[in-house]
């Protein structure tokens, strides 16, 4: 595996760390892009992809916002918890091995193998 793929995989792990559990985030070495699947609804999986982790995070936030706007009870006001979730800081640090808060990058809370969203994806070939 190339060094750039290792760095990109770590960036995908950071995005996965900050993402809600309905998201599955991966680096695709074949297509040289980051990919994320939002799988809260088994009938409709939303897929986004981008060349950088920052762009992917922005697209994920847009999907979450769209889902929130179209949820049942969308006429209710925005709660502080939801507002905080939509305003999370960018999770990708400048450089491999560093977290946004300094120090080492933590292991992802939910690796792609353990993420509830990823369990719905077909097994890799």
Image (spheres, helix red, strand yellow):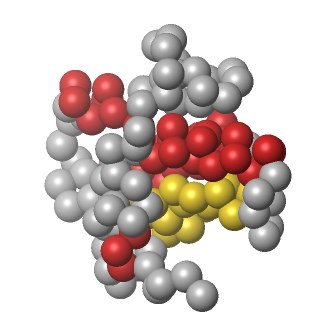
User: Looking at this view, is 35 or 64 the one in front?
Assistant: 35
As drawn, 33 above or below 119: above
Q: Is residue 48 visible?
A: yes
Quick one: which residue is furthest to the front in this view? 1
As drawn, 22 above or below 84: below
Q: Position of residue 95 (x, y in %)?
A: 70, 24
The C terminus: image quadrant: bottom right
Q: Residue at x 32, y 62 (%)?
A: 114
User: Looking at this view, is 87 or 12 the one in front?
Assistant: 12
As drawn, 95 above or below 3: above
Q: Position of residue 50 (x, y in %)?
A: 72, 53
Q: Position of residue 92 (x, y in %)?
A: 59, 30
Q: Residue at x 41, y 39 (%)?
A: 107
Residue 42's quadrant in the figure? bottom left
As drawn, 89 above or below 109: above
Left or right? Give the position of 42 relative to 48. Answer: left
The N terminus: image quadrant: bottom right
């Amino acid at each position: 595996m190339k060094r750039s793929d290792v760095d990109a995989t770590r960036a995908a792990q950071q995005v996965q760390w900050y993402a809600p559990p309905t998201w599955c985030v991966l680096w695709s070495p074949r297509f040289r892009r980051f990919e994320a699947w939002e799988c809260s609804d088994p009938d409709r999986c939303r897929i986004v992809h981008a060349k950088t982790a920052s762009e992917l995070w922005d697209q994920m936030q847009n999907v979450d916002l769209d889902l929130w706007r179209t949820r049942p009870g969308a006429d209710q006001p925005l709660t502080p918890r939801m507002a905080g979730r939509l305003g999370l800081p960018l999770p990708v640090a400048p450089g491999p091995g560093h977290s946004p808060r300094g120090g080492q990058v933590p292991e992802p809370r939910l690796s792609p193998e353990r993420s509830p969203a990823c369990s719905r994806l077909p097994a890799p070939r």
